[in-house]
Amino acid sequence: MNRTTLSLIAGTVALAAITGFASLSEPDASGTDTAEAAAVLPVERSGLLCPAPSASDLAETTYTSFTPVTKGAGSDGSAQLQAAPRESTDTAATEDDEKTSEDGKTTDTPDADGSDTDKADTDKADTDKADDDKKTAAKPVLAPKAPGTPVTGETSGADGPALVGTAEGGFAPGWTVQQTTQVTAGNGRGLLGVTCTAPDTEFWFPGVSTAADRTDYVHLTNPDDSAAVADIELYGKDGAVATTVGEGLTIPAHSTEPILLSTLTGEKQDDLTVHVNVRSGRVGAAVQALDDKLGGDWLAASTDPAGTLVVPGIPKDATAVRLVVFAPGDTDADLKVQLAAPTGLITPAGQETLHVKGGMTTAVDLGDVTRGEAGSLVLTPTDGSAPVVAAVRVVRGKGDKQESAFIPATAQVGARASVAGNGAKDTTLSLTAPTGTAKVKVTASAGTGGGTAASQTYTIKQGTTQDVRLPVPAGLKGTYALTVENLTGGTPVYASRTLTATDGGIPGFTVQTLPDDRGTVAVPEADEDLRVLQK
């Protein structure tokens, strides 16, 4: 085998270990899949994006960064989360400022006295801009010292920027960042939380609204050095909603764009689905939904369209639950609606099935479906149903002391998932195993201010949801992270975490799901690759 082939193999293995996006396998001549010979390696680089937290002067925001300990990852590397740099508005140079030499390089034109005042002016402008950035941009920078211990940063007011983060080496596998904001009054008051997301090219958000009492923004954040171009499509109860400026939106490099949905269409609808499709580049996306009476929260993207979906961890004291489902494409979907309760799967009275027309958004009120017990919604096709996306809007409290939050359908925990920013008394972890009994290990990390990690293993019976009693880190100071590991391979487990914070009698809360952290990637062993290529 020549040196070029060996270099190609090494490059492929390194790329897979860095991206973590795909599991590589190559069938041998007999058709046997060599995936079983693959080595599972930690990813070596991860990226996360956090949207600008709030436009309220009363906002208080906390960021918590955490990387779980991963076997084989080591402790080298770093994880940093900081304000996205502002896009320069002066990028064009004039002929008076520059000249091009014979070798094609651009050089500054000196002044008559031999000095270079243009360069001095440029240096001064750069210094002034840097000073302005320091004055105008709150910059929480989170740099953990070691995997296994979370760190926090804070910002306040309406000037909190969108954040861009990168983790490398031992800090990359399973890296997660929680953004939690408390707003004490005004539109969207309450507790708003979101898990910062990895950049991608497609997002689905069922549950948005352009109604008069809602102010919903789609936040698009571009982490890259070139502009991204995205389309925002809206789908309501009658299908696609005409938009005025939803196509070809440009998100400049290293910037964020909050787009008010009501500016895209004149139609007022309570229940819509947003589809963000990125034509070029990639972005992070999240929806901030603010209600005049029911507070506000972030709506994270639903998992990819699928025939079976799970919405885990509806709070047991929910007073109203509204399910929103969308079927992409032209094919209708017929779904069985079930609640995974502590005693097993039950069917909500009068809501046994749901018919969703292709290309349309359907919403149904489930009331206080949990009736004081832990519960998760399980949607399954009644026949060869079309794939769908889904989310629920949950309301807690009564009268003028109500608060709302969103829970999207999510991917399963997989091998491992983590969530940060948990407090000693304000956190509920919900686990559900719709199709089979599963054993789940939950680890509570050390606190941001000190403490010792603690673990507990739970058995989640088939078809049930359990709000588990969490292990408490010994000597806990500050907040801590939770890591969930599915010890029963092949049996799906879904999870969500609820944070609560009551203010003035209003039960503020926010819910984040825990999909697989994709902290490892399967890479074929070099010996196996050599054997395959030699054949």
Image (cartoon, rainbow, N blue to C red):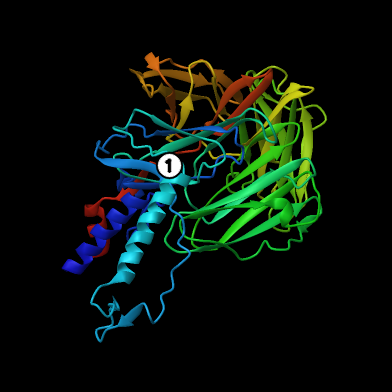
Label 1: how many residues lie within 10 Å, few (<14), some (14-19) or many (20+)? many
Residue 154 picture location, percent across and down: 46, 33
Question: In the image, 342: left or right of 198?
Answer: right
State left or right for residue 336 relative to residue 39: right
Percent of width and height locating residue 79: 34, 41
Q: Quadrant of the N terminus?
A: bottom left
Q: Is residue 452 above or below residue 414?
A: above
Residue 86 horizontal/vertical position (percent): 46, 55
Q: Which residue reaches farthest top?
A: 475
Q: Which residue is mark 1?
A: 139
Viewer can see residue 65:
yes
Quarter containing the C terminus: bottom left
Task: Work out whether residue 68 or residue 328 is closer to the camera in this orientation and state it.
Answer: 68
Q: Residue flagged by tag 1: what amino acid is it? A: Lys
Residue 183 vs 50, above or below: the answer is above
Please give left or right for residue 109 compared with residue 363 in the image: left
Residue shown at the point (54%, 40%) measured from the top left: 411
Quadrant of the image occupied by residue 175: top left
Closer-to-camera residue (229/394): 229
Vertical comparison of 499 with 98: above or below: above
Question: In terms of depth relative to the viewer, which is nearer, 11 or 511?
Answer: 511
Report x, y in % for residue 341: 65, 22
Q: Residue furthest front?
A: 113
Work out whether residue 358 can be spotted. no
Q: Is residue 369 left or right of residue 164?
A: right
Residue at image point 76% right, 61% down:
242
